Image (cartoon, rainbow, N blue to C red):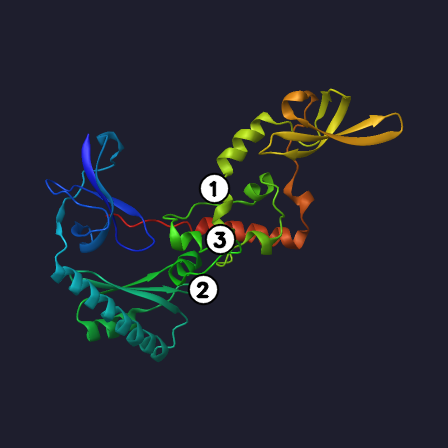
């Protein structure tokens, strides 16, 4: 077993494990740690805890110290410097007439680097901009292009559910989201209803994917012929979470529908392929959905190594 603490550097953001050594560190306190990018100021999100060493991908870096009042004041000063750096960089962007949108500035705790985050539709030649910024700040300058999902994560906002966006409150990493997830959850395949503030497919489609996948394996597909308490019929609807099915039955010339628990029916003839998404959505919406799906996949965040 290995004793660890979990540290977060940005809110919201990924939690990284560090070795506290002999220190007892409380949740909510601040620490100074050594990372591959220099010294960082972080907040402890997980207090001293033992976990199996097999769960650790690499040897842990040790924390340098619990943050002192001087460290906290220095971090506050950095935050103020970030605001000024943002204004200066925006002026330089206008000067060089660059088609890019500056979203955030991050000062490294030890002053070894300033990172400017921006969005742009394509590649930007910002070499002259970097030279100008280096002349002003006299430290290493990095311009980092981010995706639109990361931009919204930094800006913040509320989703259509009325709550704060998941990426701004608790979601640490972006994951691939697909149209298939929406279809399996019986959500309308309307781009405006299943895309978030970022214009990508909503991250929350991913949350219940495993549950739906597990239940759908036990349920007959739409179009399957089944035998139930009232005879043979065709599956025309599925209530996945309740594990119930809607069956179309015939009594002579009459057609009627009944719902059963999935356990009450026996599949006589299953369908070979699942219903195509194309059958549920028009060509224009399908093209937009497929574009959203590809964008979501390309935007999946690659976390920096600590």
> Which dot marks residue 296?
none
Q: Hey, which residue is sitting farthest bottom in the picture?
A: 95
- Residue 197: x percent and y percent? 49, 59
* For the residues bearing labels 2 and 3, Cβ distance under 8 angstroms: no
At x 53%, y 56%, the residue is: 160
Q: How many residues crowd mark 1 within 10 Å: few (<14), some (14–19), many (20+)?
A: few
Q: Helix, strand, or loop for circle 1?
A: loop
Q: Position of residue 119 (x, y in %)?
A: 40, 64
Residue 207 has which mark?
1
User: Residue 277: which quarter of the image?
Assistant: top right
Mark 2 crowdedness (10 Å alpha carbons): few <14, some 14-19, many ≥20: few
Q: Nearer the viewer, residue 191 or 126?
A: 191
Left or right of 242, for residue 108: left
- Calculate the distance from the C-alpha at mark 1 to the C-alpha at mark 2: 29 Å
Which residue is found at the position 67% from the left and 30% from the top? 245
Q: Earlier in the sequence, mark 2 or mark 3?
A: 2
Q: Nearer the viewer, mark 3 or mark 1?
A: 1
Say which mark, if any, is on residue 121: 2
Residue 129 pos. (x, y %): 29, 72
Percent across and percent down for residue 79 are: 24, 66
- Quarter assignment of residue 239: top right
C-alpha gap between disc 3 and disc 1: 19 Å
Q: Is residue 128 visible?
A: no
Marks 1/2 in contact by CB < 8 Å: the verdict is no
Residue on which the image places disc 3: 295
């Amino acid at each position: 077993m290995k004793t660890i603490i979990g540290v977060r550097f940005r809110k919201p953001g990924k939690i990284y494990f560090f070795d506290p050594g002999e220190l007892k560190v409380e949740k909510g306190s601040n620490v100074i740690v050594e990372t591959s990018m220099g010294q960082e100021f972080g907040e402890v999100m997980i207090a001293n805890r033992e976990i199996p060493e097999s769960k650790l991908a690499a040897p842990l870096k040790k924390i340098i110290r619990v943050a002192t009042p001087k460290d906290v004041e220095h971090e506050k000063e950095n935050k103020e410097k970030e605001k000024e750096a943002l204004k200066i960089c925006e002026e330089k962007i206008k000067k060089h007439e660059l088609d890019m949108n500056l979203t955030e500035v991050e000062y490294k705790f030890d002053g070894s680097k300033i990172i400017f985050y921006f969005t742009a539709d394509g590649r930007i030649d910002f070499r002259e901009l970097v030279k100008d910024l280096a002349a002003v700040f006299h430290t290493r300058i990095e311009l980092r292009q981010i995706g639109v999902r990361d931009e919204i994560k930094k800006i913040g906002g509320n989703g259509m559910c009325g709550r704060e966006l998941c990426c701004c409150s608790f979601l640490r990493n972006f994951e691939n989201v697909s149209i298939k997830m929406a279809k399996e959850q019986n959500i309308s395949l309307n781009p405006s209803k299943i895309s978030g503030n970022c214009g990508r497919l909503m991250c929350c489609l991913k949350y219940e994917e495993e549950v739906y996948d597990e239940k759908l394996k036990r349920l007959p597909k739409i179009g399957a012929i089944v035998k139930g308490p009232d005879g043979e019929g065709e599956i025309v609807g599925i209530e996945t979470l309740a594990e119930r099915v809607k069956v179309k039955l015939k009594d002579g010339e009459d057609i009627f529908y009944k719902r059963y628990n999935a356990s009450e029916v026996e599949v006589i003839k299953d369908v070979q392929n699942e219903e195509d998404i194309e059958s549920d959505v028009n060509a224009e919406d399908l093209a937009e959905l497929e574009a959203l799906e590809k964008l979501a996949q390309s935007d999946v965040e690659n976390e920096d190594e600590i």
